[in-house]
Image (cartoon, rainbow, N blue to C red):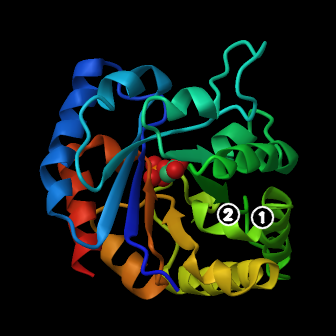
Amino acid sequence: MKKQKKLVVGNWKMNPLTLEDAKNILNNVKKISPKLKKTEVVICPPYIYIPLLSKTRVKNLSIGAQNAHYEINGSFTGEVSFAELDQFGVDFVILGHSERRKMGEDNVLINKKIKAITGCGMKAILCIGESQRDHGGDYLSFIRSQISECLKDIPKKSIDNVIIAYEPIWAIGAKDAMSPVDLHEMNIFIKKVLRDAFGVLADDVRVIYGGAVDKNNAFELVKEGNVSGFLVGRESLKAKDFVEIIKIIESI
Ligand code: PGA
C-alpha cells in the first residue's frame, strides 16, 4: 500500500468574481504549501483563471479543474477537454459534482470522463453522495451504484488515479457538516465497495469528505471520520480560514 498524502481540495465554483481576488487567495495558499509534509492542496478555479494561476508552480500545490470533456477536441460548444487542460499543468479534475449532476450529468457520462482523465495519468476527483438518508438504508445501495457505474471498466492499474469525494448533497452549502461518526461508517462502506471491485489496489484510493467543512469541524471530521482530506467549497474562498483547514489536516 502506497503512503498517499492527505488532500485538501478547494472548489471555488463560479467564484471569485475578479482575477485579483483569485490571485490573493492563491498567494495565501502558496505561502503555506511548500512547508507541508503530509498534505497536498489543489485549487480548482473557474476555467478562465487557470492559465493565469498555473504559471508559477509551488510545491504541494496544484491547480485543478471543476469539470472536463472526455473527447480530446471537437465540436462541443462551451466545453473544455482534459487534453486542453493538461497543457496548463492541470493534474486534478473534479467530476460528477452534484451541481453538475443537477445540470444533467449522469453516471454514464461521468464514467466516460473518468476513463479519459485517468487514462492519460491525470487524477479524477469523483464526487458521490446521496440527496437524503432513509431508515431502510437505501442510500447505501445508491452510493454503491454511483461508485460501480462511474468506475465501470476502469482498469485496475488506473484506480490510484481516482479520488473519491463523498459529499452528501444535504450537507453541501448547509450550516452543519455530517457527523464524524456517520462519516466514519460511510468511509468504511465506500472502501469496502472499492475493495470488492478493485481488490487490494483499492486500498490506495483516497476518500475525502465535502459538505460544510470549516475550521471548526475539520479536526473531528478527519480524526474520527478517518478520511484522507476534504473537498471544500465556501471556506476555500476565505484565504485565512482555508489555510487554517490545511494546517489542521497537516497536524493530524
Ligand atoms: P461547501 O461546498 O463546502 O460550501 O458545503 C462543498 C462542495 O460543493 O464541494
Counting from the top left corner in percent of width and height, residue 108 is at 87, 47
Q: Which residue is mark 2?
A: 158
Mark identifier at residue 155:
1
Q: Secondary structure at mark 1?
A: loop
Instruction: Residue at 22% x, 71% y: name it.
Output: 37
Quarter of the image for residue 5 reads: bottom left
Name the side, left or right, on which 248 lies relative to 188: left
Q: Are marks 1 and 2 in contact (CB under 8 Å)?
A: yes
Q: Is residue 98 visible?
A: yes
Is residue 140 or residue 26 the one in the foreground? 26
CA distance separating discs 1 and 2: 5 Å
The verdict on label 2 being within 8 Å of ligand 1 is no
Q: Is residue 185 above or below residue 29?
A: below
- Report the residue at 50% width, 78% height from top: 179
Q: Mark 2 Cα within 10 Å, few/some/many (few <14, many 20+)?
A: some
Q: Amino acid at mark 2?
A: Ser
Residue 130 image point, x, y percent: 73, 62
Q: Residue at x 69, y 69 (%)?
A: 157
Q: Is residue 145 left or right of residue 147?
A: right
Q: Position of residue 10 (x, y in %)?
A: 40, 48
Q: Amino acid at mark 1?
A: Pro
Q: Quadrant of residue 228?
A: bottom left
Q: Residue at x 70, y 28 (%)?
A: 72
Comparing 13 with 182, the one in front is 13
In the picture, the disc for residue 164 is none
Q: Secondary structure at mark 2?
A: helix
Question: In the picture provided, is 121 more to the left or to the right than 5?
Answer: right
